[in-house]
Amino acid sequence: MPAENTPILLEQRLVKTDAATLQCSETSLCLSDDRDEIVLSRYIEQYSLEGVQWVESTHRVPVSALLQWMLAQGEAQTLKHGHDG
């Protein structure tokens, strides 16, 4: 990915569930290379005595669909400007 398309880190966690298990996770958001989609990525690693397991998942949404959803679901806030007398 180009430098200007650096993912935004939304969440990073490190959890020790017991004496022998450690879980690391990271959630990030970025634009696709063609800038047509927003990509949400989640990566999870779990370390234990049995070894290391990891899962990576991504969800993609067209930017236009997200904007249409925001317009339909969001609450409009309007500023009114006027002149006295």
Image (cartoon, helix red, strand yellow):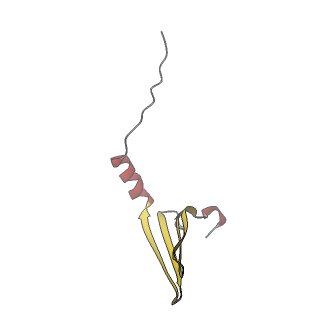
Residue furthest to the top in view is 85
Q: Quadrant of the N terminus?
A: bottom right
**Foreground residue among 25 and 42:** 25
Please provide percent x and percent y for residue 22: 54, 77
Q: Is residue 26 above or below residue 65?
A: below
Please provide percent x and percent y for residue 61: 42, 64
Q: Is residue 27 above or below residue 18?
A: above
Please provide percent x and percent y for residue 10: 53, 61
**Tally of numbered discs:** 0
Residue furthest to the bottom in view is 50
Question: Which residue sits at x=64%, y=67%?
Answer: 2
Question: Which residue sits at x=37%, y=52%?
Answer: 68
**Foreground residue among 16 and 68:** 16
Q: Is residue 43 above or below residue 10?
A: below
**Foreground residue among 59 and 42:** 42
Residue furthest to the right in view is 3
Question: Which residue sits at x=61%, y=64%?
Answer: 6
Please provide percent x and percent y for residue 9: 57, 62
Residue furthest to the front in view is 19
In this rendering, position of residue 8 left or right of residue 42: right
